[in-house]
Image (cartoon, rainbow, N blue to C red):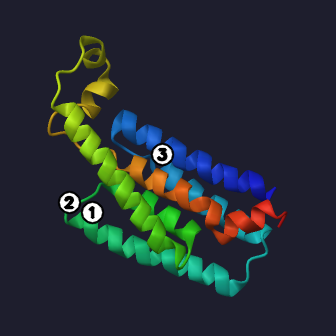
Amino acid sequence: MLSLLVAAFALLMLTAAFYDAATMTIPNWISAALIGVFALTALGAHMSWHDVGLHVLTGLGALVLVVVMFALGWIGGGDAKLFAAAALWMGWPDVLMFAAWAAMAGGVLTLFLLLVRQSPMPAQLESWRWSARLLKTGGDVPYGIGICAGALIMLPGTSIFLTAMSGG
């Protein structure tokens, strides 16, 4: 059961990344589902109230930070909610490495898009709305991809994952 819930986390993160790449948006239901699946996972893993509290405080702390970043125009609202929901899963102190991996993955993605956007786009790619938006010179970066990458890189080392894989 726990392994299915952890797999649901990974699937939801991948879904967010694909949505962001295709539409430059991350639907609210994905972040809400991540929170709900965390609650089920915490129950199934018999996490102590102390551990659940640390995860919740980590998620809330991340939310405060990313809301400020959103207000400054540095990230989108969907990215902010996705990051906070993923931070809830990571807990303290794993959230620090998650943030570092997400930043590195997002940076690599940004550099890649800057490079690709300097080249002429093939006609076939111009005809697809999602690729035209993604490869548009000066366009936004779907940072949900970097957040997803950071979360999936960190997931195998998290206490939730290790508990799920050990059978609860």
Q: Is residue 167 above or below residue 139?
A: below
Q: Nearer the viewer, residue 125 or 78?
A: 125
Left or right: 74 with respect to 138? right
Residue type marked 1: Phe
Work out whether mark 1 precedes mark 3 in sequence or the reverse, and give the earlier one. Answer: 3
Mark 3 element type: helix
Q: Which residue is mark 2?
A: 73
Q: Which residue is mark 3?
A: 16
Q: Residue furthest top?
A: 123
Query: Nearest the camera: 90 or 63?
Result: 90
For numbered disc 2, what is the local secondary structure? loop
Label 3 Cα neighbours within 10 Å, binned few <14 / some 14-19 / many ≥20: many
Lower position in the chain sequence, tag 3 or tag 2: 3
- Alpha carbons under labels 1 and 2: distance apart: 5 Å
x then y, percent, for residue 7: 68, 50
The residues bearing labels 1 and 3 have C-alpha atoms spaced at a distance of 18 Å
CB of mark 1 within 8 Å of CB of mark 2? yes
Label number found at residue 70:
1
